[in-house]
Amino acid sequence: MDKYIDNMLAEEMDLIVLTTDSHRREGLPEGSVGTLICSYTRHDRPLYADFALEGGHREAALGLKDFRVLNPRASRDAALIADFLRRRNLRAI
């Protein structure tokens, strides 16, 4: 197993994509890309991720089934990562 298959192995600073709409009310629909900032501790605590939004950032508590880790070697994920970095760099200008 690896972190691209098992979210319990996801690490801090991994790029992730939301796979559910459970955070839509917070402005984070399915497909939102963010950075994991607190990984799984096996103590029934949520994982946390940071998402860049227009005008700032939003931190969200996630369950293990809310996301998947983006794999830069997979073509579908490489496109998501490139788009995320492009949008982030445009906001910095």
Image (cartoon, grey):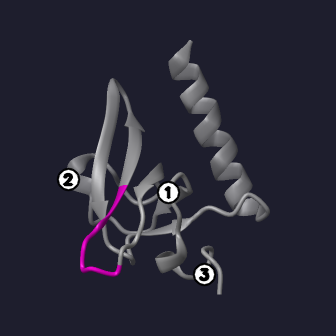
Q: Looking at numbered disc 3 in the image, what kind of residue is underneath it?
A: Ile
Q: Local crowd at mark 1 within 10 Å, few (<14), some, or many (≥20)?
A: some
Residue 33 seen by the camera: no
Helix, strand or loop: magenta stretch? loop
Sequence-earlier tag: 1 or 3: 3
Q: Residue at x 27, y 60 (%)?
A: 61
Give the x, y percent position of residue 83: 64, 41
Q: Which residues are magenta?
A: 42-48
Of tags 2 and 3, the one toward the viewer is 3
**Mark 1 highlights which residue?**
12
Q: Is residue 68 visible?
A: yes
**Mark 2 vs mark 3, CA separation in Å:** 27 Å
**Residue 86 falls left or right of residue 45:** right
The kind of secondary structure element at disc 3 is: loop
Labels 1, 2: front one: 1
Which residue type carries mark 1? Glu
Checking the image for residue 25, the label placed there is 2
User: Which residue position is annotated with label 3?
Assistant: 5
